[in-house]
Image: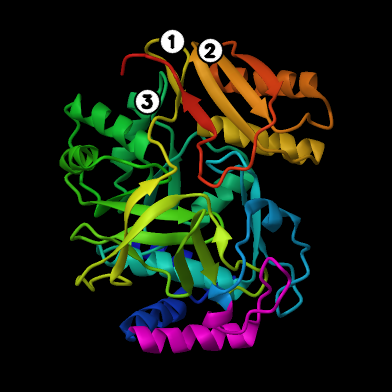
Amino acid sequence: MIRAARFLLTRLFFLGMGLPISRYRKEVEQLWRLNEEGRADSLDRFLARNRPLNSAGIEVGSLDALKSSPSLSKKQLRSQPRLRQTKSGKPGFGRHTAGTTGEPTEVTLDRKELGRMLAVRDYCFRHYGFKLGQREARLWGRPESGVKSLLKNFVLNRRVFHPVGPQAQAEVAHLLSWKPDYVYGYASLLLETARIIDGSEIEFDPPKCVVCTAESILPTQKAYISRVFNAPVAEEYGSTEFDVIAFECTKGHRHLVNPWLVVEKGKFGDLISDVSRFSQNLIRYQLGDSFTIHRTECSSLGSTEYIGQLQGRTLDRFFYLSESEKIHASVFSKAFDQYFKETIDVFTFSLQQDAYTQLEVFLDRAPKSGIANLKIFLEQEISNFAGVQVGVRVSVVARGSRSEKRNYFVQNMKASE
């Protein structure tokens, strides 16, 4: 009874925000019931109505015009002026991240665009018997704090857990006692959690599903997580710019699931366009990942096209403090994100670890406030979080243009698991 009431409260919150998730989900289902010709006609109509601009500044009013357009890089996206306000004239929703490539990205959404994104997520979740808004245990890179985060997580009916460090076992015990409907998080943290559960005698009610995101994971690792949690494991592939792009069905295919996205194989990388986007131009966008696209007769979820091999993401995302102590590398992207906010500066970065508690930082240019200022900021932020002194060395290294995605953090340690 309490669970049902909390779910209803969350969905009412979405409605109050102007996000009718159920209506948009039905639109998702309807579009995927169309044959390829019917869906193409629908996408043509979206483009004819929205007429987004490609990277050359030319209007795109059809799929033919889209496929003949030049690609859009992350740098070009960042330099786009925010000319497209929401249709109501009201401020839109912003999403930003330092990203797995170390290139900060920010996108703007109106209510309809955010509603469609959440509807795609709800559509995927229902394939496994649960819904967006039900109790979620989220395994994230660092604990969240502050009134804003607490309020957001309460409204969304989720709790964030950080199963790394001295408190890891207590975190996992707390997670299991909370009895989430589903578990969602980084593959590396899900593996850490599974190892802790496997080494204990804790009895718990299994979730309906475990959703892996942000990092690649091996089939054997997925099978291990599934066995320990006694639940199916689904791989999600998404991004800040588009949210869920592909989602794994119960038969193991990572289907394309957003019916408004056009996914293409490009000469210098894979490209994604959002034909429904009004607030921002995303035509043949170079997301940075490289993947193969296959076709299957399986039609249980989204498109009959699915993503096969995916490159550009890694599971080895831990920074080692000692042979047995480590923190998740997402701490670094959040630290850089905070630095960008405080200094009103943006640059690309990559990180590397070659020794315990030592972080190498490589920048494409010097920060406006200077290298020494960045070094002090990072050492203080990371050391405070890690609980030990972490040394940071910052270097400016010119790099040529890269067409393939590289992870912002490279782990060269030989530390034992």
Quarter containing the C terminus: top left
Work out whether residue 323 or residue 413 is closer to the camera in this orientation and state it.
413
* Residue holding disc 1: 322
Q: Residue furthest right?
A: 369
Give the crowd class for mark 1: few <14, some 14-19, many >=20 residues within 10 Å. Answer: few
Q: Is residue 142 above or below residue 394?
A: below
| The residue stretch that appears in magenta | 36-65
Vertical order, 252 against 188 (above or below):
below
**Mark 1 against mark 3, which lies toward the viewer?**
1
- Residue drawn at (44%, 60%) of the image: 244
Q: Which residue is mark 3?
A: 168
Above or below, 381 relative to 209: above
Kindly check if marks 2 and 1 are in contact, taking CB atoms under 8 A apart as contact. Answer: yes
Is-magenta flag for residue 410? Answer: no
Whichever of callouts 1 and 3 sits on the residue coming sooner in the sequence is 3
Label 2 vs label 1: CA separation? 7 Å
Give the overall secondary structure of the magenta segment: helix
**Marks 3 and 2, how far apart in space?**
20 Å
